Image (spheres, helix red, strand yellow):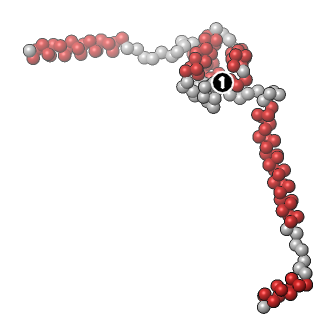
Amino acid sequence: MKLTRIVRLIVILCLLQSVSVWAQEAQPLQANAAVEVQVERLSTQLRCLVCQNQTIADSHAELAQDLKQEIREMAAKGMTDQAIIDYLVARYGDFVRYKPPFNPVTSFLWLGPFGLLLAGGFGLFVMLRRRQKMSVDVPLSADEARKVSELLK
């Protein structure tokens, strides 16, 4: 009885050892390293359409992974970065770019912060000028001067 348990244990250990012989190190998704470099470069330039404030490289959303796979397939076909970006912009709009280009549609996005800064500075200037005009020293009348001198005595 004890001998059969030992034999079973040895057989199980041999089977487990044979499984580790077949195990391999994880292979990169693409054998071509240049394609992977291109995919990573483009993934940092494109926005995740689900997360909206992350790049595709940073996002773990399924759509981001699908877009990354789509980029990988286009890169494997030999498409340039610009061709891939143009394809994705045509499909999803300029929103897919993490840094949208300057054009009439996005001009408010690019110039808005500067406009707000200028408007705030102008408002502050006007407010300080009004305050300065309000605090102009007016000489005391004779009656007021007499009251002040009485209070100080």
Direction from residue 49 to residue 116 in the image, left or right: right
Identify whether 140 is placed above or below 69. below
Residue 21 image position (x, y, % from top left): 34, 12
Disc 1 crowd, CA 10 A, few/some/many (<14, 14-19, 20+)? many
Residue 131 image position (x, y, % from top left): 84, 62
Residue appearing at x 84%, y 55% in the figure? 125
Q: Nearer the viewer, residue 7 or 58?
A: 58
SS for callout 1: loop
Residue appearing at x 68%, y 11% in the figure? 79
The answer to which quarter of the image holds residue 152 is bottom right
Direction from residue 117 to residue 54 in the image, left or right: left
One can see residue 44 in this view: no
Identify whether 19 is placed above or below 143. above
The answer to which quarter of the image holds residue 143 is bottom right
Which residue bears the numbered disc 1?
Answer: 46
Q: Which of 151 and 5 is in front in this view?
A: 151
Residue appearing at x 57%, y 12% in the figure? 32
